[in-house]
Image: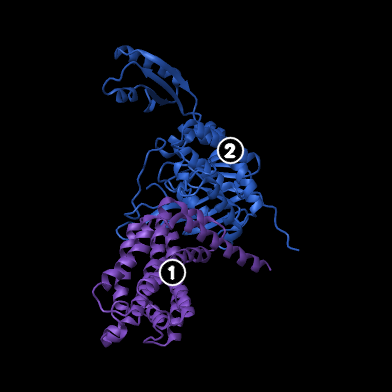
């Protein structure tokens, strides 16, 4: 009788590389550069990075939608290059765009997916009912998805991805563009799935979401993994990154340059009506800020010192604000699905 | 036993894909326009004021509808699914690429068979056509539908998410094949050069098979027609598989 080794990793990636060949007028492009990481079973793993960093390309390789140029992927113990079939049966995939069939009802969408994963009729009926109730779509089960809101389609898309109770769920940008209620509902479901033993791999540039949800995060930048750790440990590592957040009554011309010129300030970004000043020593900076406000005839509306956040870690590593686009050379004149290049 | 179970699963999955596509795409304007109305428009615009026996007209109408309709599905459905992101759901599912392609081929084939049934009705009722060998006609319709659906799938497999990128070349090539394949100009009336060119088109053999079935006679050997259609259907799968693999390298 064959014995299988005890497997604790849901995902094992070794030297994974994706090189898009030159096509037509497009240049060749290295999207993912020899990355290595593992994801343990039952973990919620966040894959963070700015747009174009290689997140979606990596996820597409992990779900066998894209052929790697080099390297090895093992999903739940199966080598994806040679033994994809059993791995694919245990994977659920929620892409960035909710890929539901809008011409079908919510019920028919789930039935189709259940059949595709060879579930018995009784199992898929029971599971579809359970999921539609969990996702708040039971009353709409006979409504075509074309009449659904974006949040409802997103929930249906997730329900379709988990109807067969996958051991590993991939979510690409699960909540951006959703109303707060839908986003919270989806985050609650992700936590519940993790509690039930599902490994969750989330690709996102929503730092706060990763901070709240993930057991560990990897930050990928320009095709390479810069760091992997728990959100808390990452924040401790970057403890020297502190910031002061201040709001004034007005916004005089050249204020950003003037704030950047203050002592101990390394960089300044505007967040809503507030200015965030990164610095090593807030106590030294505070008197300078008060003096600056007096000189500029500005009143201070609020002033806070902030401990480093995951967003600060991200900023330090990638050199980019969250969600900004750093456009690499385009491999092809047409947009590829592999990322937002 | 395990292999049998896997094969049975794969067939069931192909059928699942086919049923879903029938529900989702058959009533789409693109399918109705390119798959249903166009072959009839083409036939009637060509036939008006031409001397043609009823059986001959019916045979041509059948070959034309099977060819045009079956080959219309792939170039429309797959790029549309790529654009909507739903194709990823199919590619990520636990089934082989050939299973997926067979499911897609059946979508176009069943559509063509349904439209051919309408064409047969039009031929018998309105053109007063008679069918010499009904069973052969049914076999020809089924074989032609699957073969030309497999041909259409080649265009659908081109790595793009824009149906427009595929519709244009696929329509152009279908038009060219129509003119060289004895549909509008019978093989017997062609010059030797044109006739030699027509032999490279599988539509030539489908038209000849329809002539055998409806008129009771054809220019070529009946078995040659059947074998060429069968082999073409299988060979058409190869470029589709290759293009899908290319798509996975390029990121479509």
Residue under the image location 50 percent in, 56 percent down: B20
The span from disc 2 to disc 1 (Cα, nearest Å) is: 49 Å
Could you tell me if residue B66 is visible in this image?
Answer: no
Residue B27, compared with residue A254, is above or below; it is below
Residue under the image location 60 percent in, 55 percent down: A89
For this orientation, the residue located farthest to the right is A1
Residue B162 placement, left or right of A203: left
Give whichever of A300, B55 is nearer the camera: B55
Residue B127, compared with residue B250, is above or below; it is below
| Image quadrant in which you'd find residue B118 | bottom left
Give whichever of B28, B247 is nearer the camera: B28
**Image chain in blue:** A
Label 2 environment density (alpha carbons within 10 Å; few <14, some 14–19, many ≥20): some
Q: Position of residue A187 (x, y in %)?
A: 55, 36
Question: Mark 1 — on which chain does it sit?
Answer: B
Question: Mark 2 — on which chain does it sit?
Answer: A
Residue under the image location 44 percent in, 78 percent down: B229
Residue to which mark 1 is pinned: B117
Nearer mark to the viewer, of 2 and 1: 1
Label 1 environment density (alpha carbons within 10 Å; few <14, some 14–19, many ≥20): some
Give whichever of A148, A212 is nearer the camera: A148
Secondary element at image label 2:
helix
Residue to which mark 2 is pinned: A189
**Count of labels shown?**
2
Quarter of the picture holding the N terminus of chain A: bottom right
Give whichever of A162, A323 is nearer the camera: A162
Q: Position of residue B83 (x, y in %)?
A: 40, 52
The colour of chain B is purple
Could you tell me if residue A45 is visible in this image?
Answer: yes
Residue A35 placement, left or right of B167: right
Residue A242, compared with residue B218, is above or below; it is above
């Amino acid at each position: 009788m064959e014995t299988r080794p005890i497997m604790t990793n849901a995902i094992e990636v070794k030297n994974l590389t994706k090189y898009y060949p030159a096509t037509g007028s497009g240049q060749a492009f290295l999207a993912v550069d020899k990355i290595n990481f593992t994801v343990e079973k039952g973990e919620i793993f966040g894959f963070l990075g700015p747009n174009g960093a290689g997140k979606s390309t990596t996820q597409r390789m992990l779900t066998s939608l894209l052929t790697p140029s080099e390297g090895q992927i093992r999903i739940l113990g199966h080598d994806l290059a040679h033994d994809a079939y059993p791995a694919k049966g245990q994977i659920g995939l929620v892409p960035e765009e909710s890929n539901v069939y809008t011409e079908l009802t919510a019920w028919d969408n789930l039935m189709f997916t259940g059949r595709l994963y060879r579930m018995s009729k009784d199992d898929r009926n029971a599971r579809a009912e359970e999921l539609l109730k969990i996702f708040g779509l039971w009353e709409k089960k006979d409504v075509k998805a074309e009449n659904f809101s974006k949040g409802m389609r997103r929930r249906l898309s997730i329900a379709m991805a988990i109807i067969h109770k996958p051991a590993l769920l991939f979510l690409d940008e699960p909540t951006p563009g959703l109303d707060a209620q839908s986003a919270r509902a989806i985050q609650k479901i992700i936590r519940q799935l993790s509690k039930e033993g599902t490994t969750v791999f989330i690709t996102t540039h929503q730092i706060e979401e990763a901070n709240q949800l993930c057991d560990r995060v990897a930050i990928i930048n320009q095709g390479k993994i810069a760091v992997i750790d728990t959100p808390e440990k990452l924040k401790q590592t970057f403890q020297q990154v502190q910031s002061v957040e201040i709001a004034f009554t007005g916004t005089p011309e050249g204020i950003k340059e003037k704030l950047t010129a203050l002592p101990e300030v390394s960089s300044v970004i505007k967040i809503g009506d507030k200015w965030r000043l990164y610095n090593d020593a807030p106590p030294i900076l505070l008197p300078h800020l008060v003096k600056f406000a007096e000189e500029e005839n500005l009143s201070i509306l609020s002033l806070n010192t902030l401990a480093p956040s995951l967003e600060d870690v991200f900023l330090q590593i990638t050199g980019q604000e969250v969600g900004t686009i750093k456009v690499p050379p385009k491999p092809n004149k047409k947009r590829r699905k592999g990322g937002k290049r | 036993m395990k292999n049998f179970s896997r094969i049975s699963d794969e067939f069931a999955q192909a059928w699942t894909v086919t049923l879903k596509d029938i529900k989702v795409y058959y009533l789409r304007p693109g399918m109705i326009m390119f798959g249903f109305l166009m072959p009839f428009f083409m036939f009637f615009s060509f036939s008006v004021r031409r001397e043609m026996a009823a059986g001959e007209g019916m045979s041509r109408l059948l070959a034309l509808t099977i060819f045009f309709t079956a080959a219309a599905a792939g170039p429309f459905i797959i790029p549309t699914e790529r654009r909507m992101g739903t194709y990823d759901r199919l590619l990520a599912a636990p089934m082989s690429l050939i299973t997926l392609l067979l499911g897609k081929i059946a979508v176009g084939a069943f559509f063509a068979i349904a439209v051919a049934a309408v064409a047969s009705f039009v031929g018998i009722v309105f053109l007063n056509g008679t069918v010499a060998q009904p069973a052969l006609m049914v076999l020809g319709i089924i074989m032609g539908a699957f073969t030309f659906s497999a041909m259409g799938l080649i265009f659908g497999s081109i790595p793009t998410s824009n149906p427009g990128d595929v519709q244009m070349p696929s329509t152009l090539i279908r038009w060219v094949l129509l003119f060289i394949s004895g549909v509008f100009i019978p093989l017997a009336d062609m010059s030797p050069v044109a006739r030699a060119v027509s032999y490279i088109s599988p539509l030539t053999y489908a038209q000849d098979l329809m002539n055998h079935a409806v008129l009771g006679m054809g220019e070529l050997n009946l078995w040659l027609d059947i074998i060429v259609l069968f082999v073409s259907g299988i060979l058409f799968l190869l470029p589709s598989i290759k293009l899908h693999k290319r798509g996975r390298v390029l990121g479509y």
